[in-house]
Amino acid sequence: MGVRTFICLSLEDQIREALKQWQIQLRAEYGDVFRWVAPDHMHVTLSFLGNVEVEQVSAVSDSVRRAVTDLSSFRMGLSSAGAFPHPGRPRVLWAGVGAGRAIVERLQGAVTTSLQEEHGFEPDRRKFHPHVTVARASRRGRPPDMEKALAETCSREWGAQWVERVDVMKSELRPGGPIYTVMASLPLAPGRKNC
């Protein structure tokens, strides 16, 4: 069966709280047309691996460690909003990475390249867009056109944090929602905290 595994950047509490407040505003207007991601499950996914054999998890973590060992910690901020595949027909609502975006993209590239070369994991064919998922369309009605609502929050600041590690996560799917567990927390090289 294996362990459902993904690689991510975890969020600090103040960013999760800001995103939760945004969810409350959206939920008041759109209700159960969307399934709202629990704030403690919010993160920036670098790579979703699917089921990984239990005996391979340690080797996967070692690959990620090698991929990030020379990359420095950095400041990351969330400062945009959008939807996949498009605000006019949203399946996923997200808050996007603004500050530090290029570094997150470089980090994701290093991780996916390492996992492909060392373990054969195929990278996602879609262009990487660093974001935090806040909601997914439910099966209760057709999601509304979100173009106007998202444009109004497009320049909103969700907060910023210092990113010092990459987490290898286990995801257990349960009827009440997934349970996430950190299997490995891999440090980035110390960076200069001058802001």
Image: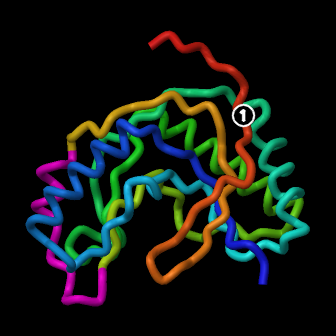
Q: Indicate whether 179 appears above or below 20.
A: below
Q: Indicate whether 125 appears above or below 60.
A: below
Where does residue 73 sit, x and y in percent of width and height? 62, 27
Where does residue 34 sit, x and y in percent of width and height? 26, 75
Highlighted magenta segment, given as a residue range: 138-154
Q: Which residue lies furthest to the front in this view?
A: 176
Rendered-image quadrant of the C terminus = top left
Relative to 114, 4 lies left or right: left
Quadrant in the picture for residue 3:
bottom right
Where does residue 151 sit, x and y in percent of width and height? 15, 54
Residue 146 painted magenta: yes
Nearest the viewer among 128 and 189 is 189
Rendered-image quadrant of the N terminus = bottom right
Quadrant in the picture for residue 147:
bottom left
Q: Residue furthest top?
A: 194
Image mark count: 1
Q: Residue at image x 78%, y 49%?
A: 64
Residue 181 painted magenta: no
Local SS, label 1: strand
Where does residue 107 sit, x and y in percent of width and height? 64, 43
Q: Residue at image x 36%, y 36%?
A: 14
Nearest the viewer among 127 and 28 is 28
The crowd level at tag 1 (other Cα within 10 Å; few <14, some 14-19, many 20+) is some
Relative to 125, 53 lies left or right: right
Q: How is the image coloured?
A: rainbow
Q: Residue at image x 45%, y 38%?
A: 12
Nearest the viewer among 45 and 105 is 45
Q: Which amino acid does label 1 sit on?
A: Pro
Q: Residue at image x 17%, y 68%?
A: 146
Residue at which label 1 appears? 187
Q: Is the magenta stretch mostly helix, strand or loop?
A: loop
